[in-house]
Amino acid sequence: MDTLIKDKILAVTRQGRTRAESTDWFRVTVGLYYLAGLMTKEAIDFKTVDRDFNRFIYHTIGGGHTITSILQFMSGQRVLPIVQSERYMAAFTSTCTDVPADSIPFLLELNLGVAKNISKLDVAGPLHDWLEAQKLAQKTRDGGAAAEGI
């Protein structure tokens, strides 16, 4: 996690109107960068990556927050108001150009799939429904079949 990524995350975070909103925007932005970073053919040293993210998270929003808690946050319905917020999406897309906005549903589905595999719980719920709606909308835009999901 380099300084440029940290600066971008903090720039999005600062655009939140309240402390709670800023914290949620921080969580989602960090989580999206983390998940986007997994999309590589190179070997990932998760111990190092997680340590770097956890250190940044701790220094920014304090103890009790880790990359694991952020990914848990992003696997539930509390992520929806953020990714559906026009203000958040405008801030994210203008600042974090290295994580394409159209990859967000895929990254959230990836995270939800991992959560399902770990917990063995059903993923049905508002986030899953939103992801399905996003795939249907993409299918309609592309004129083809929606990709199979979780």
Image (cartoon, rainbow, N blue to C red):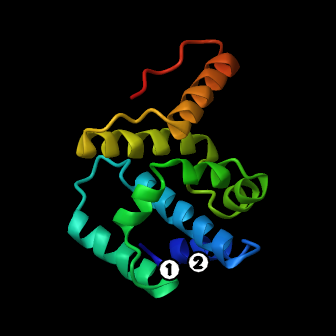
Amino acid type, label 1: Thr
**Residue 54, percent from left and from top:** 36, 76
Mark 2, Cα crowd under 10 Å, few <14 / some 14-19 / many 20+, is: few
Q: Quadrant of the N terminus?
A: bottom left
Give the residue at the far top of this rendering: 144
Residue drawn at point x = 24 percent, y = 46 percent: 118
Mark 1, Cα crowd under 10 Å, few <14 / some 14-19 / many 20+, is: few
Q: Secondary structure at mark 2?
A: helix
Q: Secondary structure at mark 1?
A: helix
The residue where tag 1 is placed is: 3
Q: CB atoms at circles 1 and 2 under 8 Å apart?
A: yes
Vertical placement of residue 76 versus 19, above or below: above
Vertical placement of residue 83 versus 106, above or below: below
**Residue 55, percent from left and from top:** 37, 82
Q: Nearer the viewer, residue 81 or 28?
A: 81
Whether residue 23 sits left or right of residue 148 in the image: it is right
Please tell me in which quadrant of the rendered image residue 123 appears. Answer: top left
Q: Nearer the viewer, residue 127 or 44?
A: 127
**Residue 150, percent from left and from top:** 39, 29
Whether residue 107 sits left or right of residue 91 in the image: it is left
Q: Nearer the viewer, residue 137 or 132?
A: 132
Whether residue 11 sits left or right of residue 58 in the image: it is right
**Residue 44, percent from left and from top:** 25, 58
Alpha carbon distance from label 1 to label 2: 6 Å
Vertical placement of residue 27 versus 150, above or below: below
The residue where tag 2 is placed is: 7
Residue drawn at point x = 50 percent, y = 79 percent: 3
Amino acid type, label 2: Asp
Vertical placement of residue 22 versus 77, above or below: below
